[in-house]
Amino acid sequence: MCGVFGIFGGPGEVNAASLTYMGLYALQHRGQESAGMAVSDGDSLQLHKEMGLTANVFDEEIINRLPGSLAIGHVRYSTTGESSIINAQPLLAHCSKGAVALAHNGNLTNAQELRRELELGGSVFQTTTDSEVVINLIARFGKDDLQTATIRAAKRLRGSYALVILARDKLIGLRDPLGIRPLCLGRLADGAAGRTKAYILASESCALSNLGAEFLREVEPGEMVVIDQAGLRSIKFASRRRQAFCVFEYIYFARPDTFLAGKNVHEVRKAIGAVLAGEAPVEADVVIPAPDSGTSAAMGFAAATGIPFEIGLIKNRYVGRTFIQPAQEARELGVRIKLNPVESVIRGRRVVVIDDSIVRGTTSATMVRLLREAGAREVHLYIASPPYLHPCYYGIDTSQAGELVAATHTPAEIRDLVGADTLHYLSLQGLLRAVGTPGQKLCAACFNGKYPVPVQQEVNLPEASLA
């Protein structure tokens, strides 16, 4: 996963770099490896990006060197792509349309095919991300304006994408025809007059509320939004035969205060916890969350069962999300230093732990071990999602089935591997009931193997193809 952000304000209306910085800060949970922004002052584009968190990449001096009222930004989470500054975004290119910057959340399943075609046509690539495929496709339609070229490029793309594109005097946002990845539209108004000062595009609505901006709506699947001095206009570039929004956004990735498809993520996760409690009753003394992604589900579980909710594990706030660390060694070290049990809550008690998912099992095993060491009498592990059985090819770091513990072990074997007394997964039917969205409008391929977009065989995937 990655986070994208874009803002278009009138000249002198906003400091785009400052607002983009705050927007990326709100989206930091979506990617922690690199951060960057491209800013336009109406005449030229300036780019700054580095490895690291948003707060480490930008300071006041750098922000002041990026004047302008138009900008896009990106926080990166690499999957099979190399974690390197060469792949940090936004990408900036110079073509017949002038300077164009692009930021991408998602993964193209036909990136290898398109890249080979472009290389044979003379294109030169500087990165190993599929995002550069998109910007090369746009540049190839040299006689078209940026809007037309972007539509023509989008019609060649397969897979998931939420894109923000910046030109000297224009901001474009678009979302794949199935709406796999999120993108929303907001408005920053003059408090006194209610006049629109800027339009904003963001991966999640939490980035809008952090800026005091009004949430207008989500960018529709297959829709392109164009914002320039003439205002805002919408273009449907693809028919919406079906939707396939990533259900894992509700389970793990999105921030709890975000609204997705009209549903608050925190409330959905509470509903997931309540359904999980009904599917597998337990006798226990305390319910604790795996911080922080299990907190909302644990609250729902505790409310449904009447078992007291407590904070039994304290998270070191200066350690990143271990699931989105690029290397297994980093994950294992991160888990050990990020959690510390509250012994007075744990000792001598039967503990229910609610976690959002088990992908590789690293976090779960360490967490159970810490609770045992703190004196837990029993540890019952409840997972607020079904078994993660199949790789994701649309932008989550699970592109090899061998890394997925549920693909190679039964629930009973996983229970023994992580050291829990019992292990219970939420059923897929229970998940869909809690989310409250028909299954045909969601992508749950990681649970059921039903991929909404055809994918290449795993052995043929490019070594580095993801945004």
Image (spheres, rainbow, N blue to C red):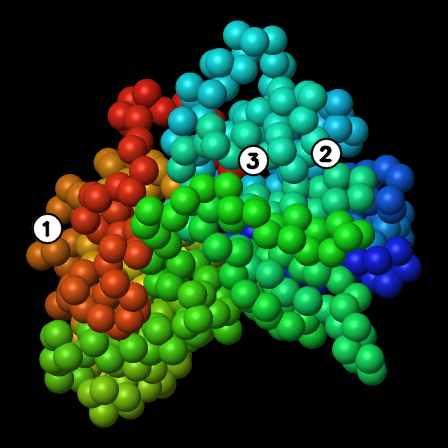
Where is residue 109 shown, x and y percent of the image? 39, 31
Where is residue 274 shown, x and y percent of the image? 24, 80
Q: Distance between the Cα atoms at labels 2 and 1?
A: 49 Å
Taking depth in this image into account, of 211 and 238 the one nearest to the observer is 238
In the rendered image, which residue does mark 3 sit on?
A: 151
Instruction: Say whether residue 150 is left or right of residue 277.
Output: right
Question: Element under label 3?
Answer: helix
Instruction: Say whether residue 189 is left or right of residue 314.
Output: right
> Which circle, 2 or 1, is nearer the viewer?
2
Taking depth in this image into account, of 435 and 351 the one nearest to the observer is 435
In the rendered image, which residue does mark 1 sit on?
A: 410
Q: Residue at 35%, 63% (x, y): give it.
A: 251
Q: Earlier in the sequence, mark 2 or mark 3?
A: 2
Is residue 376 visible from the viewing direction of this image? no
Residue 207, image quadrant: bottom right
Q: Amino acid at mark 1?
A: Thr
Q: Earlier in the sequence, mark 3 or mark 1?
A: 3
Q: Residues within 10 Å of mark 3 (few under 14, many from 20)?
A: some
Question: Element under label 1?
Answer: loop
Q: Amino acid at mark 3?
A: Ile
Q: Distance between the Cα atoms at labels 3 and 1?
A: 45 Å
Where is residue 58 shown, x and y percent of the image? 76, 51
Q: Which mark is residue 100?
A: 2
Q: Residue at 87%, 46% (x, y): give it.
A: 41
Q: Residues within 10 Å of mark 1 (few under 14, many from 20)?
A: few
Q: Residues within 10 Å of mark 2 (few under 14, many from 20)?
A: many
> Which circle, 2 or 3, is nearer the viewer?
3
Q: Which mark is residue 465?
A: none
Residue 374, image quadrant: bottom left
Q: Is residue 312 above or below residue 427?
A: below
